[in-house]
Amino acid sequence: MCVTNKVVLVTGASRGIGAATARAFADAGAKVALVARSTNEINAIAAEIGENAIAIGCDVADYGQVVAAIEQTTAAFGPLDILINNAGLLDPIDHLAESDPDVWGKTIDVNLKGVFYGMRAAMPDMIGRGAGTIITVSSGAAHGPVEGWSAYCSSKAGAYMLTRCADNEAREKGVRIMGLSPGTVATDMQRDIKASGVNPVSQLEWSDHIPPEWPARTLVWMCSSDADEFLGTDVSLRDETIRQRVGLV
Ligand code: NDP
């Protein structure tokens, strides 16, 4: 699928991977809705992109707000073609036995329930039209435990299973669903990880991380049929052949 004139909603677009993704889709000719809680930030990025972008304040942990964000996007640009479930939290960075249950639950609300809410709100219309792409930003943490990240690993593992379940039910109806595991990316999330000093990821050098533009450009590429072999699973940006296919190296 060429994304020119396609309608895209990116969650967590106020900074990091989401902000770079909104810019990458706009650069590729799409119409983009930027969604996050920090309205000043998304308003500024949307203004910078111009008439092909709108900013929508929304907490993805609230189903009603997710439904309203998709309705607002459709009213502005037409039916949603592409949903990028990118919004994410990492906290608490603590051993499970010492974790604050409320903070732990908030990460499940955003990273797991927020992804379900996006799929639940977007899929009926996509299935009805027999077209659409939903990509969830996954993580290596979806596939193995990392010390101090029990909420994050559990939420990402759950989101990966949502990708598999949604693909299982919607692929034959024309809807493309998959995940992107980006490796480590130079964003605020990695600053928090570094500051924690917990586990080997916090010991990485800043230069070990890829720039947010790499997952952003990969997400645009994943909207093309060239990525169809990855439906129902995660594309890994650690994979050198993927980097080559996207044109990053
Ligand atoms: P950042 O912390 O830089 O950005 C997180 C984004 O999520 C912000 O835009 C934030 O916006 C948004 N967000 C958080 N909670 C909510 C909410 N309740 N409702 C709406 N938006 C929300 O992180 P990254 O850019 O690094 O991460 C983006 C995604 O990539 C996440 O899913 C993360 O797990 C994943 N990822 C990141 C990696 C990395 O190394 N950086 C590695 C692997 C995966 P606001 O606060 O304004 O609401």
Image (cartoon, rainbow, N blue to C red):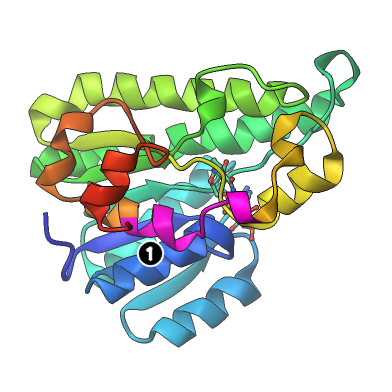
| Residue 213 relative to residue 200: left or right | left
In the picture as drawn, the residue positioned furthest to the right comes out as: 98
What residue span does the magenta drawing correspond to? 207-217
Amino acid type of the residue that numbered disc 1 sits on in the rendered structure? Gln
Residue 148, percent from left and from top:
78, 25
Magenta stretch: includes residue 157: no
Please tell me whether the stretch drawn in magenta is mainly helix, strand or loop: helix
Q: Please name the residue that numbered disc 1 is placed on.
A: 72
- Say which quadrant the N terminus sits in: bottom left
- The residue at the point 57 percent across, 26 percent down is 141
- Mark yes or no: residue 69 visible: no
Task: Give whichever of 63, 191 is nearer the camera.
Answer: 191
Residue 208, position as x, y percentages in the image: 60, 49
Choose top left, top right, bottom left or bottom right for residue 226.
top left
Above or below, comparing residue 57 to residue 156 in the picture:
below
Query: Relative to the observer, which residue lies in front, 113 or 140?
Result: 140
